Image (cartoon, rainbow, N blue to C red):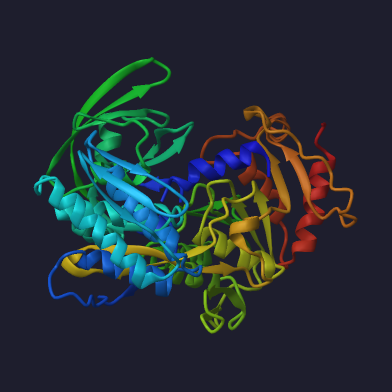
Amino acid sequence: MSSNNNFRKYSLGLLAGLLALLCLPQINILGPVGLRGIADAGFFNNDLEVFEEVIDLVSEKYVYPPNHKKLFSAAIEGMIKNIDSDHVTLSKNPRINTVRYKNRNTRYRLTYDKKHDWDELQKVYYFLHDQSDKAITKESLENSAIEGIMGSLDTYSQYMNEDSFKKSMRDTEGKYGGLGMVITMKDKRLYVVKTMRDSPAERAGILADDSFVSVNGKEIVEMHIEELANLLRGYPDTKVTLSLERPSEKRKRTYTLTREIILISTVEYKTLDNQIGYLKINSFSKQTEKQLKEGLDQAKEDGVKGFVLDLRENPGGLLTQSVKVASHFLFKGRMVVYTQGRARNDYHEYRGLYRDSLYQVPVAILINQYSASASEIVAGALRDSGKALIIGENSYGKGSVQTIFRLSGGSGLRLTTSKYYTPSGIDITEHGIVPEIHIINDDAGEEVPKPDKNDSSQSSLNLKASNLNKFFEKQGISLTADHDSSIELALRILKNTTVASKKRSMEKAREIAANINY
């Protein structure tokens, strides 16, 4: 894997996605989720009750078998690390570890036995609390221990306090109190991707590429994208002050905005050249299929004969919605995706739902490096069906399923419980979705990949974005952000095509490529 891909994996892994729609909860962006009941803790008092629930859920439900020594070690080190005191030190030894607080110490030894390690953790927990004369609270120690565990798992598993959990549950409904902007991370800084129409952010004059400096006086330095989203979201009619830097002006602008209920428009529809319908899906929330149906109804009235399905910048969302969206373009009963958990019998298939679908209509799908999770489910299902041509960049590669568990006291746990695979068995996390037509962003320094000598089929096609732009502009096509060269290419591939055939679409793509002067 190239260094660029590694950096992309790192920066996007900080999402919670990837990308974060401020109007869309990361519970959706980060991937498909479900909701389970409250786990029971077997305590006579409340000490470490939530921690016990978390360790039990990780042990029983996490996608990979638990390493209890690693989990409890991360929990203890989390408690020690987050104590703001020079008096606490940890000496690690292969046989036994020593925690020192001022002039006192306690020792612990971890094994791979859960019960033994649980006793050792409690010993450290009470030692730190008691030796600090209760200045270090039990709650802070417990939270630090939980954060330690979650930090040892994967990017998408996360502990949510009561407020965060409520926000996650509320935001899955597809509406929230916020400012109406899409944010992303690049070069370890948080930027605005775009503002939504008639939103507080748009009316204030916030522009794409504005970078965040502070929110309510809190500096945005090495901040997780989910943390920023939580700062910006809130109850309607409340105010938030944010400072952003505009690169073109090299100066900071400060805004005080009032949050509003933002109804998320996840699907945009328009017709291209009277023949092809264009569907831009920005995310997969509970509103998505309903909005897709509205677009498809309009397309039927317009008499379109094919669809460009644009999933670029789409960080994902609900598994159920991805299955419903894909089902509109697949034969009923055809597999959309399957998931596999830790246990062999933890296997689930999801198949096409609708008899009256558009499985005979040709489709071209646009993806890029920010297309993740549910986006990859749809792209992979339609690609594997043999009907859809994939155009763009390799997708992000987020092929894990997160389940939401409600914990005691109203908090929650987002935990990776399984992985999903395309119908042909492709591991999305490992490979992502690889387009048949790769658009190389050479203006950003991306190089044309060398041909694979082992690939005798030469089934893929590489096109430079700069050459595509010049080619279409010479033909009098006015390229804009809403109609770029990738959309124009997809339109030309589908135009005058009546059969949903990837082979035929690739033939047309090669005809177009032959006319481009490299």
Residue 52 sits above or below residue 368 on the image: below
Residue drawn at the location 74% of the way across and 63% of the way down: 502
- For residue 428, what is the image quadrant? bottom right
Q: Is residue 246 left or right of residue 359?
A: left
Closer to the camera, 164 or 192?
164
Tell me where residue 344 appears, x and y as whole percent: 56, 81
**Image quadrant where one finds the C terminus:** top right
Write down the quadrant of residue 307 in the picture.
Answer: bottom right
Q: Residue at x 52, y 54 (%)?
A: 372
> Where does the image place residue 331, in percent across and percent down from the top left?
62, 79
Against 43, residue 483 (above or below) is above
Nearer to us in this view, 459 or 262: 459
Residue 264 visible: no
- Residue at left offset 51%, top offset 59%: 373
Tell me the quarter of the picture where residue 451 sits. Answer: top right
Q: Is residue 225 left or right of residue 432?
A: left
